Image (cartoon, helix red, strand yellow):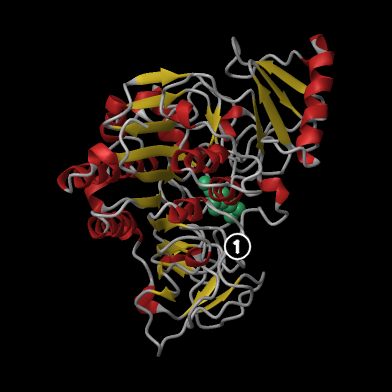
Amino acid sequence: MSNNKQPNVIIVYADDLGYGDLSCYGGVGVKTPNIDRLLENGTKFTDGYSTSAVCTPARYSVLTGEYPFRNPRTYILPGDAPCIISKEKLTLPKIFKKAGYNTAIVGKWHLGLGEGNLDWNQDITHTPNDIGFDYSFIFPATNDRVPCVYIRNRRVANLDPNDPIEVSYADECPYDDIPTSTNNPELLRMKHSHGHDQSIINGIGRIGYMRGGKKALWRDEDLAETFLNEVKSFITENNNNPFFVFYALHQPHVPRVPNPRFVGASGLGPRGDVIVEMDWCVGELIDHLEREGLLEDTIIIFSSDNGPVLDDGYHDDAQRLNKMCMHKPAGPLRGGKYSKFDGGTRVPFIVSWVSHIKPQTSSALVSQVDFMASFASMLDVDLEDGAPDSLDMMDVLLGESHIGRTEILGEAANKSHFLRNGKWTYLQPKEGPAVNYYTDIELGSSLDPQLYNMEYDIGQRENVAQLHMDIVEKMDKRIEEIKAGNYTRK
Ligand code: NG6
Ligand code: CA
């Protein structure tokens, strides 16, 4: 690096934002001027991937540098799951800590808390603070799962000891005195289309049952600003010390409830409105760094955990309005969230650093699993045997080289894999419906092998497997090799 001051690093990580959802990625229905602004001093990656088409496994890879399937617990977790990252494991925040940084996570967590049978009214023993974060202000799982509360470090925030929290993910509601979607549909202000029919919190049906904790409940309209203010305070407090922040946004995951200031901001209904709100958050973040005199010295990465979905369980008119406005959340890609097609894992991927990066577009193949080895290399921290699937791509992330990975492995929600190698993407056969009935997303499941030439078929329309069975066999073998523990870095 040309200057010897250690840059601050902020990863802004959206939830279910698609490849086509930003104006700088060609999105037509919604304007994202603040995120686009990152490209004035940044690289726009056209071929950047998360490791999974759903949240928990994708986040697991960012924080551990490991493909999700190496840990059998990397499924979409319920809100009362134990933490799936062990305290001993080398993690991304630990890399920063070894280099003298202060570290924080703010926003969505969804990697489990505690050790099982969690008592939400006591100090929690296994939180982000045990895997390398000095400070954490999170919600436990997703905004559609109970408990709908913030957790600051080890404690539920604003908890009244006289109103303890109970949480259950049993099929039947174990509490007879709480409102549920089945018993109290009159309380709902947003109707569910599938699932989300258990506890009602703030007029919205959720996944899971929750009793008590009234004062601790979040207001959905305030989530964005609450998290933003936490990030801002942490930055101000660390003005004189290098810091790493994992800013895990909750937008545009369901239920999409923008602050009233953003209602109607997009013309795309709630989904578009929360994207505008998210963009505003990024603008506020940039302005805050500037005011603190830190913008020049801060690397900002913007990406998403997985691809887009329109109907993910609530009637919020996303399908109709997106169609009407011709907004394609996955852009030219096939499939979306949950899918083995590129729409599941190929996501917006921007790296900006005001003092170092010239505006450019890069088609280098990059994966979020590489953050760990890349920052370890920048900070001169030894990975030892941690982060086995992570490659040092720092020069690529900084736009100094355009030679990325040769191969990328990704997985669908059903744990079936694809491998991209240069222009070829191969999808391993797996039984299952071609299209999910509820979300209307093409999942990429098929008993036939699929091979696509990404150079001229970005939409993965023409399966050329039969023409290139030699490539199919080679790529299939390679997936099995990687799965069997032939780690990428060795
Ligand atoms: C699914 C939910 C979906 C969403 C997803 C997790 C239903 C019917 N669907 O099970 O709404 O919460 O889990 O999304 O309950 S993720 O982005 O955190 O992976
Ligand atoms: Ca997600």
The x and y percentages for residue 427 are 73, 27
Task: Tell me the amino acid under the disc marked 1.
Answer: Pro
Q: Which residue is mark 1?
A: 78
Residue at the bottom extreme, as displayed? 162
The x and y percentages for residue 11 are 40, 44
- Asked whether residue 403 is in view, the answer is yes
| Residue at the (38%, 51%) spot, across then down | 244
Q: Label 1: how many residues lie within 10 Å, few (<14), some (14-19) or many (20+)?
A: some
**Quarter occupied by residue 80:** bottom right
Q: Quadrant of the C terminus?
A: top right
The x and y percentages for residue 377 are 50, 39
Residue at the left extreme, as displayed? 291
Q: Secondary structure at mark 1?
A: loop
In the picture provided, is 478 more to the left or to the right than 231?
A: right
In the picture provided, is 251 more to the left or to the right than 258?
A: right
Q: Quadrant of the N terminus?
A: top left
- Asked whether residue 190 is in view, the answer is no
The x and y percentages for residue 200 are 47, 68
In the picture provided, is 54 more to the left or to the right than 220?
A: right
Question: Camera-side residue: 25 or 405?
Answer: 405
Is 275 drawn above or below residue 76 in the view shown?
above
Question: Camera-side residue: 401 or 330?
Answer: 401
**Quarter occupied by residue 58:** top right
